[in-house]
């Protein structure tokens, strides 16, 4: 069985990403920030993939996420990975300047002991979510429902 890392984010296009930041620094500058953050995340994902025999990286930007709110779009990507045969899935955003290969490895290691892993953020949210296939079946789509995403 394989494991999957899903990188989830917005296309680094002016006017379509980092809107709160763009209000201060402009659309083009905000898109450049998004591009640098995305490049970092993809470099880390690639390094992880190179070190993981049965790992797969799935890039899911913009329109590839499908319609609906953030929770539905994240749930959809978890569903796809599990249906594709992943025994465990970790989903991260594309704007994590502190992300390291060790973070990803730790998340998958933790999934050997528990069906759900969260990377807690200082604001009370999270920056990483991981589920085993069994944990995915158990939560039946409820994990991301009933949340006001901001």
Image (tube, grey):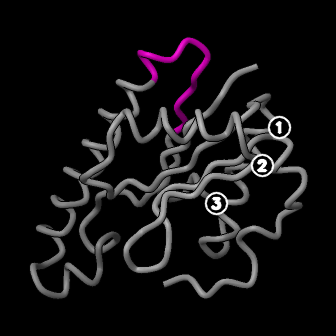
Q: Secondary structure at mark 2?
A: helix
Viewport quadrant of the N terminus: top right
State the residue position of label 2: 79
Q: How many marks?
A: 3
- Relative height, residue 24 to residue 27 (above, below): below
State the residue position of label 3: 74
Number of residues whose C-alpha sits closer than 10 Å to that of mark 2, classed few (under 14), some (14–19) or many (20 or more): some
Q: Image point 42% across, 26% down: which residue? A: 48
20 to the left or right of 108 = left
Cα separation between marks 1 and 3: 14 Å
Q: Secondary structure at mark 1?
A: helix
- Relative height, residue 41 to residue 75 (above, below): above
Residues at circles 2 and 1 in contact by the CB criterion of under 8 Å = yes
**In the rendered structure, which segment of residues is drawn in magenta?**
49-58
Number of residues whose C-alpha sits closer than 10 Å to that of mark 3, classed few (under 14), some (14–19) or many (20 or more): many
- Relative height, residue 42 to residue 135 (above, below): above
């Amino acid at each position: 069985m394989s494991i999957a890392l899903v990188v989830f984010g917005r296309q680094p296009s002016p006017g379509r990403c980092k809107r709160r930041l763009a209000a201060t620094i402009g659309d083009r500058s905000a898109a450049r920030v998004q591009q640098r953050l995305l490049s970092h995340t993809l470099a880390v994902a690639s390094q992880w993939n190179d070190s993981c025999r049965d790992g797969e990286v799935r890039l899911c930007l913009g329109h590839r996420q499908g319609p609906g709110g953030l929770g539905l779009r994240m749930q959809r990507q978890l569903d796809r990975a599990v249906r594709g045969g992943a025994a465990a899935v970790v989903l991260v955003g594309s704007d994590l300047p502190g992300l390291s290969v060790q973070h990803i490895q730790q998340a998958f290691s933790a999934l050997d002991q528990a069906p759900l892993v969260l990377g807690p953020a200082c604001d009370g949210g999270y920056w990483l979510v991981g589920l085993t296939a069994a944990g995915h079946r158990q939560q039946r789509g409820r994990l991301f429902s009933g949340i006001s995403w901001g």
